[in-house]
Image (cartoon, grey):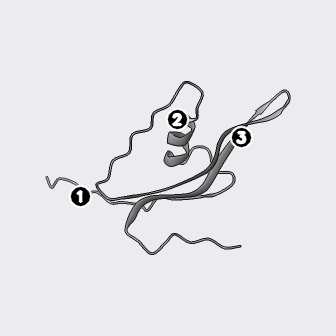
């Protein structure tokens, strides 16, 4: 099944993103089925108790590690550099 970002101006889009960490007894799910879309200029607060997956979510948004399963769409943005 192919996936492409929705035809919006979303600055960030996650669809059914999940991540598991390995353990001695198999795997431990950190995130499961996270879907969100943020437009340019929108803000998001990530809150929750210790061990709830906040840092894992932020790492996935940054591109570390790759999403599994699911898809993350982070369009590349260019910044205007100051002229000398």
Distance between mark 3 and mark 2 Cα atoms: 13 Å
In the rendered structure, which disc, 3 or 2, sits on the residue that comes first in sequence? 3
Residue underneath mark 3: 20
The residue shown at (62%, 71%) is: 3
Q: Residue furthest top?
A: 50
Determine the image quadrant of residue 69: bottom right
Q: What is the secondary structure assignment of the residue under circle 2? A: helix
Q: Is 82 displayed left or right of 58 in the figure? A: left
Disc 3 to disc 2: CB gap under 8 Å = no
In the rendered structure, which disc, 2 or 1, sits on the residue that comes first in sequence? 2
Residue 27, label in figure: none
Disc 2 to disc 1: CB gap under 8 Å = no
| Image location (x, y in percent) of residue 2 | 66, 73
Q: Residue furthest front?
A: 48
In the rendered structure, which disc, 1 or 3, sits on the residue that comes first in sequence? 3
| Image location (x, y in percent) of residue 73 | 51, 61
Q: What is the secondary structure assignment of the residue under circle 3? A: strand
Examine the rendered structure and indicate whether residue 63 appears above or below residue 73: above
Determine the image quadrant of residue 12: bottom left
Residue 54, label in figure: 2
Q: Is 3 displayed left or right of 58 in the figure? A: right
Examine the rendered structure and indicate whether residue 22 appears above or below residue 1: above
Distance between mark 1 and mark 3 Cα atoms: 38 Å
Q: Residues within 10 Å of mark 3 (few under 14, many from 20)?
A: some
Q: Residues within 10 Å of mark 2 (few under 14, many from 20)?
A: some
């Amino acid at each position: 099944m192919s996936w492409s970002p929705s035809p919006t101006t979303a600055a960030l889009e996650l669809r059914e993103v999940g991540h598991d960490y390995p353990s001695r007894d198999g795997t431990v799910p950190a995130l499961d089925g996270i879907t969100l879309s943020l437009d340019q200029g929108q803000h998001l607060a990530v809150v929750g108790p210790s061990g709830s997956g906040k840092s894992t979510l932020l790492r996935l948004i940054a591109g570390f590690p790759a999403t599994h399963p699911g898809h993350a769409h982070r369009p590349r943005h260019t910044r205007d550099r100051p002229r000398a």
